[in-house]
Image (cartoon, grey):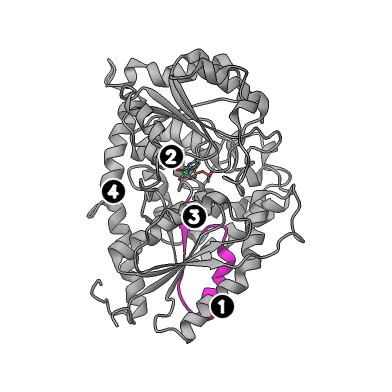
């Protein structure tokens, strides 16, 4: 009956693969290394095929329990043009009752009541459930920490600024942060203050001070100045910034099946010679942009693996809720003859690829990415320099962080919002990252190229999450506090 006093955490991510993946890693770490029992919520409402395949491919620790929330009808509240933040927030709102039942039931009928609630940054409405049953509530903030001070400051900005943020003439200074935010890099939901998505974004940001603490999916080596600012800046303190714990990077491990055809091909390529191209779980390009990218790749004469999706015109987050569901025949939308002309040099994978397995292969030497934070962390974790091609959400902010602060990417510059990048420019960027000799070692001035810098960071981030590393210790510290709160201040021996 050893489960009796085992501390029990409930984890509630938002819908979407980019949220499920890091939250699931957090859950596995808590079970495997810190002796917790975890109830992990997943949504059936608008669930993608990729989600069920991902869960099915896992073997979970014995103490990790997946709770499938029943499907809820959200159609009365959304239309085809409803933005992502609103859709996510509504799915969660319609599931709150089900979540509450699980939490409340565990405290009344089960011999292992839920003692702590960990939510995602768009799931703060569930704080009310924690308050009701009297348990502490934490946020696992899974984007870059870079976004966090902006969100803490947003309620203030909302009061101070009239009109649209995107019409401001100067970059926005955020307390504690050395790089002001360029207007072009503002996170998507604040680019139009009239949409419902802005109101939801502000709503969740304003609730951050209610959390007992914030777990960050980053580490001291990646974002030292932001982490320091969050702990020390007087204005951020005054705004009620909870204590932060950098516990990352918690990244997807390698376990997905790789088709033997892909593996054989990768094994035949020289080290660091292949560019991997993927836009995350949701990213899609317009037909015109897709054509330019195909030509750019072909002209660069570099080896590549490209995860392709059917073009979507107006919406760069075209498959956020549906990845893996769609029909996909690359022949129909790639330029005529592209597949045959690049045969042997390039591999085209429709819809979804085992990304971590690919990034960790020795043949991969660059990653053209939409800069989703998980993809970014995976690239650093496997020592791969990036071409930053941001599409939506906070990806432009991530691109700036990667290029200007962390120094592991070159950024694609778009002439205007939703502008198309031409083939010659793509060819140049691809060659720059893949061919640059200065990339491989220190150059004459002793300055590290992208590849040198990312390999150095790779070592540091692996150490950070390993036993005794800064992130491992930060998670141990939270774990200790949670256990102490379960037992009225007395620490249990680790199970
Ligand atoms: N992913 C994958 N194969 C794909 C596309 C995505 O394994 O074809 C994984 C990727 O490794 C990452 C996650 O899905 O862990 C995407 O998260 P990210 O934050 O990069 O972007 P988002 O999808 O949230 O925009």
Residue 181 picture quarter:
top right
Mark 4 or 2 closer to N-term?
Answer: 2
- Mark 2 lies within 8 Å of ligand 1 (Cβ measured): yes
In this view, the mark in front (2 or 1): 2
The segment highlighted magenta reads 119-142
Q: Position of residue 388 (x, y in %)?
A: 49, 31
Callout 1: 10 Å neighbours few (<14), some, many (20+)? Answer: few
Q: Which mark is residue 101?
A: 1
Q: Is residue 133 left or right of residue 326?
A: left
Q: Residue at label 4?
A: 464
In this view, the mark in front (3 or 4): 3
Callout 4: 10 Å neighbours few (<14), some, many (20+)? Answer: many
In this view, the mark in front (4 or 2): 2
Q: Which mark is residue 20?
A: 3
- Closest to the observer: 103 or 56? 56
In this view, the mark in front (3 or 2): 2
- Closest to the observer: 230 or 187? 187
Q: Position of residue 364 (x, y in %)?
A: 37, 29
Q: Is residue 409 above or below residue 372?
A: above
Residue 244 appears in view: no
- Mark 3 lies within 8 Å of ligand 1 (Cβ measured): no
């Amino acid at each position: 009956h050893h489960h009796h006093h085992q501390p029990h955490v409930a984890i509630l991510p938002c819908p979407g693969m980019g949220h499920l993946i890091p939250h699931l890693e957090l859950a596995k770490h808590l079970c495997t290394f810190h002796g917790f029992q975890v109830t992990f919520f997943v949504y059936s409402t608008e669930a993608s095929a990729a989600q069920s395949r991902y869960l099915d491919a896992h073997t979970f620790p014995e103490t990790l329990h997946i709770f499938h929330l029943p499907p809820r009808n959200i159609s009365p509240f959304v239309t085809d043009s409803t933005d992502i933040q609103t859709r996510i927030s509504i799915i969660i709102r319609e599931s709150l009752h089900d979540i509450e039942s699980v939490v409340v039931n565990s405290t009344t009928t089960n011999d292992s009541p839920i003692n702590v609630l960990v939510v995602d940054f768009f799931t703060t409405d569930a704080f009310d459930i924690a308050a009701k049953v009297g348990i502490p509530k934490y946020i696992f903030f899974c984007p870059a920490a870079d976004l966090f001070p902006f969100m803490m400051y947003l309620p203030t900005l909302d009061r101070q600024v009239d009109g649209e943020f995107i019409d401001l003439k100067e970059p926005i200074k955020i307390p504690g942060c050395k790089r002001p935010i360029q207007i072009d890099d503002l996170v998507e939901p604040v680019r139009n203050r009239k949409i419902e998505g802005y109101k939801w974004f502000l709503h969740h940001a304003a609730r951050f001070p209610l959390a007992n603490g914030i777990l960050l999916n980053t580490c001291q080596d990646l974002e030292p100045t932001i982490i320091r600012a969050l702990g020390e800046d007087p204005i951020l303190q005054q705004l009620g910034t909870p204590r932060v714990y950098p516990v990352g990077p918690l990244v997807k491990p390698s376990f997905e099946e790789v088709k033997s055809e892909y593996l054989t091909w990768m094994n035949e390529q020289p080290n660091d010679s292949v560019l991997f191209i993927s836009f995350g779980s949701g990213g899609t390009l317009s037909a015109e942009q897709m054509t330019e990218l195909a030509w750019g790749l072909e002209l660069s004469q570099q080896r590549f693996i490209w995860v392709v999706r059917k073009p979507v015109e107006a919406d760069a987050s075209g498959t956020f809720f549906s990845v893996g569901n769609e029909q996909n025949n690359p022949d129909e939308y790639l330029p005529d003859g592209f597949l045959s002309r690049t045969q042997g040099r390039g591999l085209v994978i429709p819809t979804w690829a085992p990304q971590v397995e690919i990034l960790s292969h020795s043949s991969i030497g660059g990653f053209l990415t939409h800069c989703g934070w998980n993809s970014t962390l995976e690239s650093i974790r496997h020592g791969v320099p990036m071409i930053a091609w941001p599409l939506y959400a906070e990806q432009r902010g991530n691109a700036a962080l990667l290029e200007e602060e962390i120094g592991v990417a070159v950024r694609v510059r778009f002439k205007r919002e939703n502008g198309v990048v031409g083939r010659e420019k793509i060819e140049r960027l691809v060659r720059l990252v893949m061919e640059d000799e200065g990339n491989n070692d220190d150059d004459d001035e002793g300055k590290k190229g992208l590849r040198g810098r990312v390999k150095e960071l790779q070592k540091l981030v692996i150490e950070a999450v390993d036993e005794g590393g800064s992130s491992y210790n930060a998670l141990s510290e939270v774990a200790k506090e949670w256990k102490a709160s379960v037992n009225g201040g007395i620490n249990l021996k680790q199970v």
